[in-house]
Amino acid sequence: MSGVVFQVRERAKGNVTTPMVLWATVMAGVLFLLESRLAPQATTAWVGVGVTALFGIYLGWRRRAAAVFVAPFVSWLFAWFPLWIAAMIHEGVLRGLLWGLFLITIGWIAIGFGEFVWLGAVAFLVRMFRGPSGRAEPDVVIFGPDDL
C-alpha cells in the first residue's frame, strides 16, 4: 500500500525580527538607565512604556500579535548583561553582583510579565480596531484515501 502525504502550510507575511530586535535593544537601554539611575526615572520609564506601545501597535497592525509571547524572552536576552552592569554601577561591585543576579533571574519574571501584558494589550487592541483581514479563508477539504 502506498500513501501520499501533502503538507500544506501558510507562512506568515511580514517578518518581525528587525522591529523586535530594535525594541529589545531600546528596552535594554531603558532598563539599564532605570537600574543605574543615570537618567531621570520618570522620563526613562515613559520612554519604555512608549516604545513598547509603538511595538505593540506595529504587531497589531501587521497582525503578528503572537510575537507578544516571544518578545519578553528576546528582551531578556538583550537586557540581562546591561542590567547586571547597571546593578553593579548603582549598588557597588559585590552587592551589585548579587542584586544583578536577582534581577536577571527572579526579577525578570516581573519585568517580562509587565512587558508581556502591556505589549499584548496594545497589540490586541490595535488588531481588534483594525478589523478582519478582508481576505476570505478558503474552506478546507480533506480527501480520504478512497476519495481520489
Image: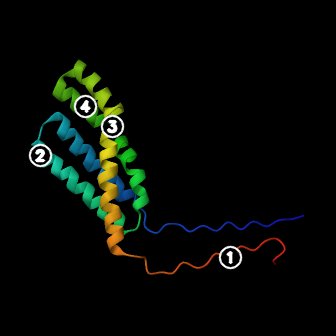
Q: Is residue 40 visible?
A: yes
- Which residue has dot 4 on it? 85
- Which residue has dot 3 on it? 108
Q: How far apart are labels 1 and 3 at the CA level? A: 45 Å
Image quadrant containing the N terminus: bottom right
Q: Quadrant of residue 53?
A: bottom left
| Label 1: element kind | loop
Task: For marks 4 and 1, give the one nearer the viewer.
Answer: 1
Q: Do the CB atoms of the residues marked 1 and 3 lie less than 8 Å apart?
A: no
Mark 2: which amino acid?
Ala
From this viewpoint, which residue is outermost toward the top?
A: 94
Lower sequence index among marks 1 and 3: 3
| Label 4: element kind | helix
Task: For marks 4 and 2, give the one nearer the viewer.
Answer: 2
- Which residue has dot 2 on it? 42
Q: Nearer the viewer, residue 3 or 121?
A: 121
| Label 2: element kind | helix
Q: Position of residue 62 (x, y in %)?
A: 38, 68
| Residue shown at 29% from the left, 32% from the top | 103
| Label 3: element kind | helix
The vertical placement of 12 against 68, above or below, is: below
Mark 1: which amino acid?
Val
Q: Do the CB atoms of the residues marked 4 and 3 lie less than 8 Å apart?
A: no
Lower sequence index among marks 1 and 2: 2
Apparent side of residue 3 relative to residue 140 in the rendered image (left or right) = right
Q: How far apart are labels 1 and 2 at the CA level? A: 56 Å
| Residue shown at 29% from the left, 53% from the top | 118
Q: How far apart are labels 4 and 2 at the CA level? A: 21 Å
Q: Do the CB atoms of the residues marked 1 and 2 lie less than 8 Å apart?
A: no
